[in-house]
Image (cartoon, rainbow, N blue to C red):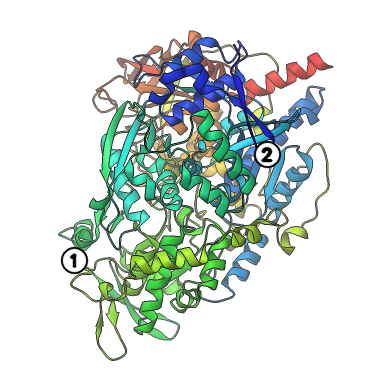
Amino acid sequence: MNVRTQIEKDGEVFEFIDLKGLCGDRLNHLPYSIRILLENLLRRQDGKLVKEHHIEKLVNWKGEYKEPVEIPFFPTRVLMQDFTGVPAVADLAAMRDAMLRLGKDPGVVNPMVPVDLVADHSVQVDFYGTADAFMYNTLREYERNKERYRFLKWAQKSFDNFRMIPPGSGICHQINLEYLSKVFWHSRKNGRVLCFPDSVVGLDSHTTMVNGIGVLGWGVGGIEAEAVLLGQPCFMTIPQVIGVRLVGKLPEGTTATDLVLRITRILRDYGVVEKFVEFFGPALKDLPVPTRTTIANMSPEYGATVGFFPVDRKVVEFLYLTGRRREALITERVAPAMGLYYTGEENPEYSDVIEVDLSATRIAVAGPSRPMDRVELPELKKKFAEILGKDHPKRAVSVHIRGETVEISDGSVVIAAITSCTNTSNPQVLIGAALLARNAVKKGLKVPGYVKTSFAPGSRVVISYLHNSGLLPYLEALGFHAVAYGCTTCIGNSGPLHPEVEKAVEKHNLNVVAVLSGNRNFEARIHQKVKSNFLASPVMVVAFALAGRVDIDFEQEPLGMDPNGMPVYLADILPDDSEIDKLVRQHIISELYEENYKHIVDGDELWKNLSVEESVTYPWDPKSTYIQRPPFFDDFSLEVPELQDIRGARVLLWLGDSVTTDHISPAGAIPEDYPAGQFLKSFGITPDRFNSYGARRGNHEVMMRGTFSNIRIRNKLVSESGGFTVKFPEKKKMFVFDAAEAYRREGVPLIVLGGKEYGTGSSRDWAAKGPKLLGVKAVIAQSFERIHRSNLIGMGILPLQFEEGQSAESLGLDGTEEYHILGVNDIKPRKKLMVKAISDGKEKTFYVVARLDTDVEVDYYRNGGILNYVLRKIAVTDCQQL
């Protein structure tokens, strides 16, 4: 079958997959995201991995399939950030060691597709509110992470096809959007330009941001990403595609953040987990790319695999704006010829269609602990009173800060952070926030001393256009100095509060608040002393910082008083949309992007001064508390082990609904009295030098001790929250890690019981690696979030789902039982397995569904995980070559 065609423009020949020729009129009815999957398969068709029936299924795509239909997908490239990237690189280094032990060439272990790693997750807000905060935070970042950064620089020198974007450059998703993405990948061969759609998988669930410019991509676990970079496809079921028809126009004063919080609520209520969402409709014509990418970024929050916007004129203009003229030229020539260009005249068919009227959007926040819990601004004061409860009157205490006595109370905003990839590079909302700051400064308003303010742009371009517009000094006058170019507060790197504030919060058990322009606000994620966290636009982050509290009715109560005792209301200082738009047009220019990205891979002097030696295998330091060789390949052999039923298992934890990967995976600060803290102290490391779990992801000894140790995790086997469980049969309360070690010594396998949406949240590979090292063999839950289910399989842990309508509670289980899971030895996709739970001589039998949805997932599980599967393939291939 000849599936290629070509066009000639200005003396150049562009060759691509002929979707129009293959599909004819049928192409017009396919969602654009399905068309990209189809092109991907046509380009890689080999009769082995990609077969004709895969292509037939996509050409004749239906909105829904009674049985899952599996297809391979070959992403063009892989995106990493340093928290998840360090353990991924450590796994690659360990795979080289394993090859060496097998007597094979370790140098064959290399990325086979382009990999970009952006160091953006390690900087913490230790310093703020001053012009030199960025410098001091950067110095502290290198002080804490020099060992990890040397390791990454070694990888840059030692691995082929691996590009490193050094610290202080920006957030990976914004760099992906503004610099790394091509929209259409191209290479020259035999005088022709071969073109195909750009696509990406990333080690962060918010990789979806790039779907806002028509680049199909989503977050995967580290283990799945490693398989992709080693030449394996992603295997996925053909998705349902929910069309979201956008109509109308945003009202004056509302922002992209307000819109995305509304869309998140709508889509969560509808239910789009494991589905594609594709946006279309008349509103796209005027919807700016930054607004699209804000919506696409939040896909994990509304549960979809992607929130996709097809390529159109706005995307081409964005490529020109960001200095990618060649990419823009190819996109505007090839996309229409392939049938991948949206004009508004097309009428694709979707699994279902939801209409969203932009004009119904209102200013809102989301919280106090979930991104989908939207609260419109006039309702916030009432909502916070409900959070406190009728029997919990608001309390206030005095604290002394920098020679001044201030009062904090329940509802006080102690963190106000313009942070995260979602919108810290969106010109409309950032210029809007700066204009609000300008208006507030002119009114004489100040931010209370107990509010920790910070500004962490996703791109260095932001400071350039704020400086050029003359607005940066107004943000700085309110304490919003640039503290970093990284993720900071949104991922828990908010740094310490003022010591007096922390003491008061802890002593009086105050429910204080963080307001941030991020995408995640799960319990204990932002700061362990802060109970309530609200997502808001950068504009409203500044407003709440000025108010100093979240329980305020902005329509009736002033933000503060001017020096003359006159009240100043939010309405008095909100900027006009017309002024925002004017400044965006004046100051967002291509020269800024070209200048800021010209030398981005070079890094600053601190990066340049890191000295590393090139070597094929990594020289592991046994004394290191940051980087250790992961043990996943210690007993590796070329023989695939036989599967065995799981017998005599005990419940390590019994968890409820919506348990997130933040609850499971080690994240944030390392408590001194928890096993990980005690482990570090045994090396003579003082608590002030613990750093965070994220920074120590390259050391499995720390990470396994921190698994299931979030202070907010609620294990039903114990009465208090935190990383505790009960060891059976002694019924002794212990730390989770200590119990797992005791079970390991006794040879007892472990399981976890869960509720609905087990594994919600970021694509944290340690949420699967940690349980693996603790001895967990299976997780039985009512439902799984897509990425985490995939990660569990990737580590050889069996995800099992209760039958419809059943749960641990409905079956009368209490976690004290001994479990036998039968039928594992001949596992098949979605096979029903029998489970026997025995307690006090009484036996309960029930059935669960093995959530190995495809034959490939079964293969991964049989091999003990995806990396073992890939390493065996590499080793055999290398042996044949030898």
Q: Callout 2: few (<14), some (14-19), or many (20+) C-alpha neighbours within 10 Å?
A: many
Q: Residue at x 70, y 47 (%)?
A: 152
The residue lying toward the viewer, choosing from 39 and 268, is 39
State whether residue 283 is above or below residue 138: above
Query: On the picture, is 604 further left or further right than 425?
Result: right
Name the mark nearer the viewer: 1 or 2: 2
- Determine which residue is flagged by label 1: 393
**Image x and y of residue 16, in percent:** 61, 27
Q: Amino acid at mark 2?
A: Ala
Q: Residue at x 65, y 35 (%)?
A: 186
Quadrant assignment for the C terminus: top right
Quadrant assignment for the N terminus: top right
Residue lying furthest front:
10
Q: Residue at x 35, y 24 (%)?
A: 817
Query: On the picture, is 683 further left or further right than 65?
Result: right
Q: Amino acid at mark 1?
A: Pro
Q: Residue at x 31, y 15 (%)?
A: 846
Query: Distance of mark 1 from mark 2, alpha carbons?
Result: 51 Å
Of marks 1 and 2, which one's residue comes earlier in the chain? 2
Residue 90 bears which disc, if any?
Answer: 2
**Image x and y of residue 786, in percent:** 43, 31
Q: Callout 1: few (<14), some (14-19), or many (20+) C-alpha neighbours within 10 Å?
A: few
State whether residue 645 is above or below residue 808: above
State whether residue 308 is above or below residue 507: above
Query: On the picture, is 381 further left or further right than 631?
Result: left
The answer to whether residue 234 is visible is no
Q: Classify mark 1: helix, strand or loop.
A: loop
